[in-house]
Image (tube, grey):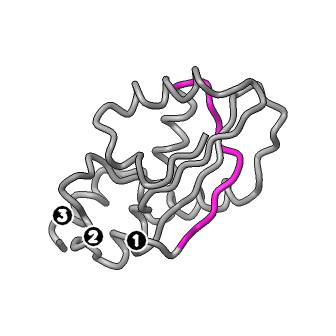
Amino acid sequence: IIGNNVLAQVPDLNDFVAGVAILLKPEGMVTLEFPHIERLMAENQFDTIYHEHFSYFSLLTVDLMAARHGLRLIDVEELPTHGGSLRVYLCHEGSAWQRKDSIAQLLERETRHGLGEMSTYASFGYKA
C-alpha cells in the first residue's frame, strides 16, 4: 500500500490507519510520505503549512499511531521534498520484517529536539 502526501490531508487518522491495517496483507508493507514537522519547525517554514493539511507529523507520532492499530515502523527515509519529508515503511506487528536502525536514530533525535513535548510546539507558535 502506497500513500504519498495523503496522510496530512486525512481528517480522521485513526479511521484511516485502521483501514490500512485491515487492507494490508499479513506480510505486506505500507509506505507513507508526509512533511516532517522537525524540519518545518527547525527552519521556521510556517509558509509551508497548507490549509488543506489537518496534521503535521514527527516520527514519534507516527510510531504511536501505527502501534495503536497493530502496525509497526520498520524503516524511514528523510527526503528533501516539501522542505523536508519522511517516507516511512510499516508492517503488521507480527510480521517478519526487521526494524532498521534508522528508526531508533530518528526517534532519538526527535526526542532530543523536544518533539515529544507540547512546550516545543507552543514555542514554535511564537516564532511563526
Which residue is under mark 3? 125
User: Which residue shows up at 62% across the image and 31% down it?
Assistant: 71
- Check disc 3: other Cα within 10 Å, few if <14, some if 14-19, many if 20+: few
Q: What is the distance, in whole Å, between disc 1 and disc 3 at their CAs?
A: 20 Å
Q: Nearer the viewer, mark 2 or mark 3?
A: 2
Asked if marks 1 and 2 touch (Cβ < 8 Å), the reply is yes
Mark 1 residue element: helix
* Nearer-the-camera pick, 42 or 66: 66
Precedes in sequence: disc 1 or disc 3: 1
Residue 72 inside the magenta-drawn segment: yes
Precedes in sequence: disc 1 or disc 2: 2
Q: Nearer the viewer, mark 1 or mark 3?
A: 1
User: Which residue shows up at 41% across the image and 48% down it?
Assistant: 6
User: Which residue shows up at 65% across the image and 36% down it?
Assistant: 72
- Check disc 2: other Cα within 10 Å, few if <14, some if 14-19, many if 20+: few
Circle number at residue 82: 1
Precedes in sequence: disc 2 or disc 3: 2
Q: What is the distance, in whole Å, between disc 2 and disc 3 at their CAs?
A: 14 Å
| Vertical arrangement, residue 43 with respect to residue 34, above or below | below
Q: Amino acid at mark 2?
A: Thr
Q: Residue furthest bottom?
A: 43
Mark 2 residue element: helix
Asked if marks 2 and 3 touch (Cβ < 8 Å), the reply is no
Which residue is under mark 2? 48
Residue 114, percent from left and from top? 42, 60
The magenta segment is: 69-79
| Vertical arrangement, residue 125 with respect to residue 10, above or below | below
Residue 118, percent from left and from top? 30, 50
Circle number at residue 22: none
